[in-house]
Amino acid sequence: MIRKFKNEDIDRVMSIWEASTIKAHPFIDKDYWKSNYDTVKNVYMPMSETFVYDDGEHIKGFISVINNDFIGALFVDVNDQGLGIGSQLMDYTITKYEKLNLAVYKDNEQSVRFYMGKGFKIVGEQKNEDSGYEEYIMEKSKLE
């Protein structure tokens, strides 16, 4: 079931974030992600509207939206990837917001394909200021 994030979910969500982000970005040193852990937990999570996929026993994934239009995170537990959880979280989020955009590393080809399959279009490219890696800006609107 997909539900709104609760404060007591934070440790599980951050555990998913850390393991999944390291796995999804092998081209970036894992120490970069570890050094960003506290910022994600204490800055980005509180400013986001987050939804979790909870199977009744464990949270298996989450999606976070900033400012009602920017997907800042979509991560699924590394042991539960490929089961459609990320797809369900994305479909749920698409129904809640008129227009969504996100940034995804160009080298994260699997995620780029996933977002394109969900109807997102590449609308720009930029260098990520923190990591220095190139990323796509992608967008989806309900009008399309």
Image (cartoon, rainbow, N blue to C red):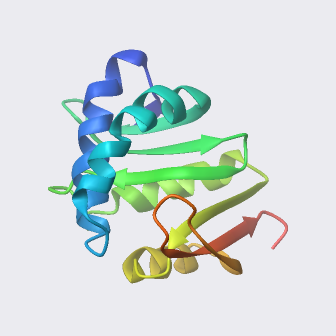
Q: Quadrant of the C terminus?
A: bottom right
- Please name the residue shown 60% across and 43% down the image: 65
The relative height of residue 9 versus residue 20 in the rendered view (above or below) is above
Residue 114, percent across and down? 46, 75
Q: Is residue 21 left or right of residue 67?
A: left
Residue 77 against residue 45 in the figure, above or below: below
Q: Relative to residue 136, is residue 42 drawn left or right?
A: left
- Quarter of the view holding residue 131: bottom left
Quadrant of the drawing holding the N terminus:
top left
Q: Position of residue 12 (x, y in %)?
A: 25, 32
**Which residue is most to the right?**
143
Residue at figure coordinates x 31%, y 68% from the top left: 28
For the residue pair 40 and 70, the one nearer the viewer reads as: 40
Q: Is residue 16 visible?
A: yes
- Residue 81 in sight here: no
Closest to the observer: 25 or 52?
25
